[in-house]
Image: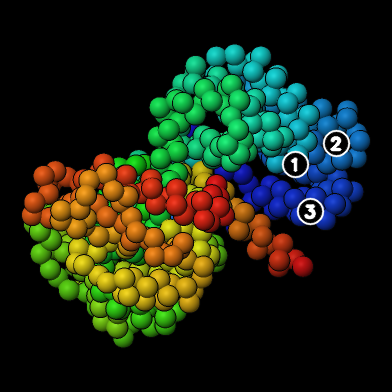
């Protein structure tokens, strides 16, 4: 199915009517709807807005008529029908949403799509047991997918540790446990030193978009970057590209460098894959814009404080250095830091894989890094050890900072 | 400005394919050459196309083309409202 494009006139009218509704000006909204009718502008969203406006005015006849016209736009598409349910859930008209949903279930008895909407509707009414039942029903028709992640988390948060029959059944499901694992990994953001943790996140269903996913800088420079509030990073005067051999691909790749903070990153641009019209001079501004956006994103995350930042160090770094990095991060926001190092040799087995320096600063240990000479999993990652650490660390931070648990 | 049309324009330019069609359910990897690096290029192009600025949390919410269109749409509506006030 290609995207459905509405006419610019319909778009403008939809925006204007939405604005009227925000101002609670239903009479102006009615005038705009009539104007659309007169000009023969028909669009599914206009019918839904019409149903809403007529409903607000207590005009049930025209409300039903608008809904009928909405459904007639694409009678055979269940997703089109469900748009009406979404609309009325958003508008908090739960009884109408339930009536429409029951009609849709009767019309499309073999479709899995109505069940997550049913769960959404129950969650909106804080009935998490029924929401769990709806997701279990969906599994009878097909697997849960990415679109259901937020629902699973809403339910988990909503039950507040007191699951009933269906919730227990839902959370004992393997697929749901995978979704929860992915959610845990989404709460972490890598600060380097390399891309090992990015690959672990990828293995757990999260593809990170972050400055240090493919880039690295020395810890002292990172402390300066945060303390300086990112001033001067990715500026034209400090940015350059160098053609270097990428050991993994065997191709010469343009690497990005920021000289002020000794930042180095992959660009994956090679002489072979860039356009023939592209030169180092034309490529650099684009690459610089790329890293500037990622730096802006990281800065916002640090100011927001709703993620756990993870710094992996192959070399031993002292507690004082960890504290210095943590303190630099605190200049931007209320941040949580997990520093990951290799487990000291001869460490007792079954020990706790981390050391709490303070509630928001933890040093964690894994048995091997992927590049370690003695890594028995080489070239793979010691996923079990990493997962053990991440699960423990997530539990620690979640207990101390429940606000991390935001879906 | 129409979010769907704008996003389609951005994708057609990013992948140098004027015939490219999109569906709301498409995700990273569904088009040859569409990876996390391309995603940054697409976000920058959307910012330029719509004269908007994505927040980090908005970027984290984007899992599919549909999500990107929804966020652009929300930001365009918010821009129109603030312009009208």
Q: Nearer the viewer, residue A52 or A310?
A: A310
Q: Nearer the viewer, residue A157 or B72?
A: A157
Does A132 sit above or below residue A392? above
Q: Quadrant of residue A276?
A: bottom left
**Who comes first in sequence, dot 2 or dot 3?**
3
Q: Are marks 1 and 2 on the same chain?
A: yes
Q: Quadrant of residue A215?
A: bottom left
* Image x and y of residue A291, in percent: 35, 69
Q: CA distance from mark 3 to mark 1?
A: 11 Å
In the rendering, which numbered label is found on residue A22?
A: 3
**Who comes first in sequence, dot 1 or dot 2?**
2
Kindly identify the residue that appears in the image at 47 percent across and 73 percent down. A330
Kindly identify the residue that appears in the image at 53 percent across and 35 percent down. A152
Q: Residue furthest bottom?
A: A237
Could you tell me which quadrant the N terminus of chain B lies in? bottom right
Kindly identify the residue that appears in the image at 45 percent across and 25 percent down. A173
In the image, is B22 to the left or to the right of A119?
left
Marked residue chain, label 1:
A
Marked residue chain, label 3:
A
Q: What SS does tag 3 mark?
A: helix
Q: CA distance from mark 1 to mark 2?
A: 11 Å
* Image x and y of residue A167, in percent: 57, 27
Q: Can you identify the residue that label 2 sits on?
A: A55
């Amino acid at each position: 199915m290609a995207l459905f494009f509405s006419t610019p006139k319909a778009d403008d009218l939809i925006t204007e009517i939405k604005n009227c509704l925000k101002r609670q000006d239903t009479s102006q909204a009615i005038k705009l709807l009539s104007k659309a009718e007169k000009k023969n502008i028909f669009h599914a969203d206009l019918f839904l807005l019409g149903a809403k406006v007529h409903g607000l005015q207590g005009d049930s006849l025209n409300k039903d008529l608008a809904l009928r016209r909405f459904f007639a736009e694409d009678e055979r598409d269940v997703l089109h029908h469900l748009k009406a349910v979404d609309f009325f859930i958003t508008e908090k008209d739960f009884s109408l949403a339930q009536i429409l949903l029951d009609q849709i279930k009767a019309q499309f008895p073999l479709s899995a799509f109505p069940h997550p909407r049913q769960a959404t509707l129950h969650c909106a009414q804080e009935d998490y047991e029924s929401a769990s039942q709806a997701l279990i029903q969906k599994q009878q028709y097909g697997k849960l997918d990415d679109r259901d992640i937020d629902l699973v988390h809403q339910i988990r948060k909503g039950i507040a540790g007191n699951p009933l029959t269906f919730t227990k059944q839902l959370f004992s499901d393997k697929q749901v446990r995978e979704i929860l694992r992915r959610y845990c990994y989404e709460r972490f953001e890598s600060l380097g030193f390399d891309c090992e943790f990015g690959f672990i996140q990828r293995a757990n269903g999260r593809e990170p978009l972050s400055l240090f996913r493919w880039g690295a800088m020395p810890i002292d420079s990172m402390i300066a970057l945060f303390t300086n509030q990112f001033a001067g990073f990715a500026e034209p005067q400090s940015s350059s590209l160098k053609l270097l051999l990428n050991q993994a691909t065997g191709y010469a790749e343009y690497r990005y460098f920021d000289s002020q903070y000794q930042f180095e990153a992959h660009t994956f641009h090679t002489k072979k894959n860039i356009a023939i019209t592209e030169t180092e001079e034309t490529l650099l501004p684009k690459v610089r814009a790329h890293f500037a956006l990622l730096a802006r994103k990281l800065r916002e995350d640090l100011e927001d404080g709703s993620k756990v930042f993870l710094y992996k160090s192959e070399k031993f770094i002292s507690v004082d250095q960890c504290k210095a990095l943590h303190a630099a991060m605190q200049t931007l926001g209320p941040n949580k830091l997990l520093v990951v190092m290799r487990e000291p040799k001869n460490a007792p087995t079954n020990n706790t894989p981390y050391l709490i320096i303070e509630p928001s600063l933890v040093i964690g240990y894994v048995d091997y890094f992927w590049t370690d000479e003695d890594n028995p999993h080489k070239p793979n990652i010691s996923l079990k050890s990493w997962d053990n650490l991440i699960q423990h660390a997530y539990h620690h931070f979640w207990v101390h900072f429940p606000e991390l648990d935001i879906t | 400005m129409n979010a769907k049309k704008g996003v389609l324009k951005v994708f057609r330019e990013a992948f140098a394919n004027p015939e490219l069609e999109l569906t709301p359910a498409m995700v990273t990897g569904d088009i040859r050459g569409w990876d996390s690096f391309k995603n940054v290029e697409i976000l920058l192009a959307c910012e330029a196309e719509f004269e908007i600025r994505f927040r980090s949390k908005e970027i984290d919410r984007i899992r599919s083309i549909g999500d990107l269109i929804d966020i652009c749409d929300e930001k365009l509506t918010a821009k129109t409202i603030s312009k009208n006030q």
